[in-house]
Amino acid sequence: MLRYVTGRLLLVIPTLLGMSVLIFAMVRLLPGDVVDAMFSGDVGATAAAKQAVRSSLGLTDPVPLQYVKMVGGVVTGHLGKSFTTGEPIAAVMGRALPITSELAILAVLLATVVGVPLGVLSAVRPNTGTDLASRVCGLLGLSVPNFWFATLALLVSSLVFHWVPPVTWIPPSRDLAGNLSQVAIPVVAISVYLLAVIMRMTRATMLEVLGQDYVRTARAKGASSRAVVFRHALRNSLIPVVTVIGFQVGGLMGGATVVEVIFGLPGMGYTLVQGIYARDYPVIEMTALFLAGVFVFVNLLVDLLYGVIDPRIEHA
Amino acid sequence: MSAPQAVGLQQAARSAAPPRRGRFTAARLRRNPIGIAGLVIVLGTVLVALGGPLLWRVNYADQAWHRLLAPSLAHPMGTDELGRDELARVIHGASVSLQVGIIAVLIAFALGSTIGVLAGFYRGRTDAVLMRILDIIFAVPGLVLAIMIAGLLGPTRTNAMIAIGIIYAPAFGRVVRGSALSIMGLPHVEAARSIGASDLRIVARHLIPNLIAPVIILVTVYLSTAILTEAALSFLGLGTQPPEPSWGNMLNTARSYMELAPWLVIYPGLAIMIVVLGFNFLGDGMRDILDPRLREV
């Protein structure tokens, strides 16, 4: 087991390196840089002046050197400074990360708490109206764009309750109630899709498990249908659901981007998009690397936990 | 959008192994109301995209002084902030969405299947190298990668299509490779080899026909997510650019006027949802028909 874990951890290194090359190359090779963006309104700017700014930002260094500096920065923890504001990237991320994490964690909690019972409910009544309705609702949940859902929720809240969430970020440590009312709509909007995924997955695995011999045995020995569903079927059918939830969490941090932009919540995705508009290389590289890194590590963790949750799986 | 990736992948991969394809029959279709609903919605969208401009002969770009008008007979979906007819713009949006969805998925399909067939056919080192490359792309969350590619290439619809095509290519690559690996191990392939069939013949006659079912399922699943992703990119200003209307950028502009003109945020969003739902329904139905073992997933 230990050997398996070490092996998997070592395999992450080439993936992370490849990712860093991909992100670095995308940022460097494509047209337009931060200096062009800075001087975009300034017709009088001379090429020499622009070049001086480039050189001060390290953009005139040979490209491989720039890459080594970026990776070195990640390894040593010196993430560099934003090109446009001069703020250390560590501070930028320190501000953005708690916001995105809060959104992602709350959305996963909400989706799980609602999605699993709905999935069970539709699985215990297969091929009925309830089942068809839940299947349709599940697909509906997969089809609603989260940014549209968020906009509609804002619209209703504004027209009916004459209330819109505040635009400046309220940290939960300062005002928990204010913070929760601010993130309520974004969290619901982000969780709709995930809720549908969890519901569909729970339904599918429940149906599979309910057809197993040991479930029939449990029924035959006279166990109440409640006991059969919850003690025998649900516990076994949750294994794949847990992994799906795990895989989703990693992607959710980046997936929250559009909703963050709508609500002006300065999270990771918001920071990334702002960085792209400004061609602020260090901001783009570090936020993208971080989001991708979280995704990789969460997926790895889920893979490893799979063996713990389901002892039948042995790592060869 | 990684959920259908994860789920779709498993399903499509499972649907590969022993080639036991179902057939489309009238009886099966009748027992499949969700699939039929999906087909109707998708065909309806195609009709609107192709025939809409002929029936509703209003130019989506014509501006007028009557701005932000509520829906009426003259303007069934009202007018926008520049007095342009919303219905004409929603109709144009249908063709934008379909075009982006189809081309982006074709890009993903072409890239992914080529890599997948090469990896599954040659196996060994080729396989390892190609799969590591796909793993790296797969390791970056889809929307983040799409935002980066579209944002850095420059915000146009073409670049959005390229971005979406690239982020979904690994999904096709993995499924096609997995299916190819299992098909290559089947007795009839071995038999073909033993009588001296060429590589090309084995790929064309034995491999590709058996890959059709998993690929069709993937295509429908990803058509819906591709349309959603284009709408998200356009919404962020990284896809289709105004003045050309797409559902995503219409929603983005409409947000500023939503209290004055709620219909401007309702119709484009509803349009996205209906079309995506249509493809999801269709995908669900196709899965039932093409691969009965996956009935419940």
Image: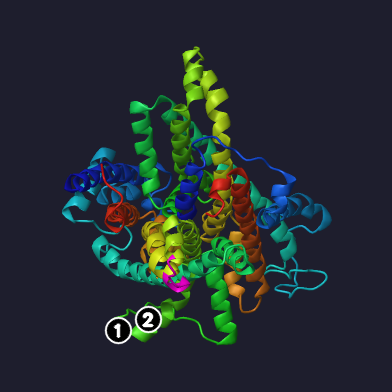
Q: Position of residue A102 (x, y in %)?
A: 35, 71
Q: Which residues are magenta?
A: A221-227
Q: Which residue is mark 2?
A: A179
Q: Position of residue A221 (x, y in %)?
A: 42, 66
Callouts 2 and 1 on one subunit: yes
Look at label 1 and name its amino acid: Arg
> Residue reaching furthest front?
A221
Asked whether A93 or B24 is in front, the reply is: B24
Q: Crowdedness of circle 2 by 10 Å Cα count: few (<14), some, many (20+)?
A: some
Q: Position of residue B128 (x, y in %)?
A: 34, 32
Asked whether B29 or A5 is in front, the reply is: B29
Q: Is residue B115 left or right of residue A75?
A: right
Look at label 2 and name its amino acid: Asn
Chain letter of the residue carrying label 1: A
Q: Is residue B106 above or below residue B27?
A: above
> Which of the labelled discs sits on residue A174, or is there none?
1
**Which residue is pictured at 42% across the width and 79% down the height?**
A182
Where on the picture, by quarter, is residue B209?
top right
Q: Crowdedness of circle 1 by 10 Å Cα count: few (<14), some, many (20+)?
A: few
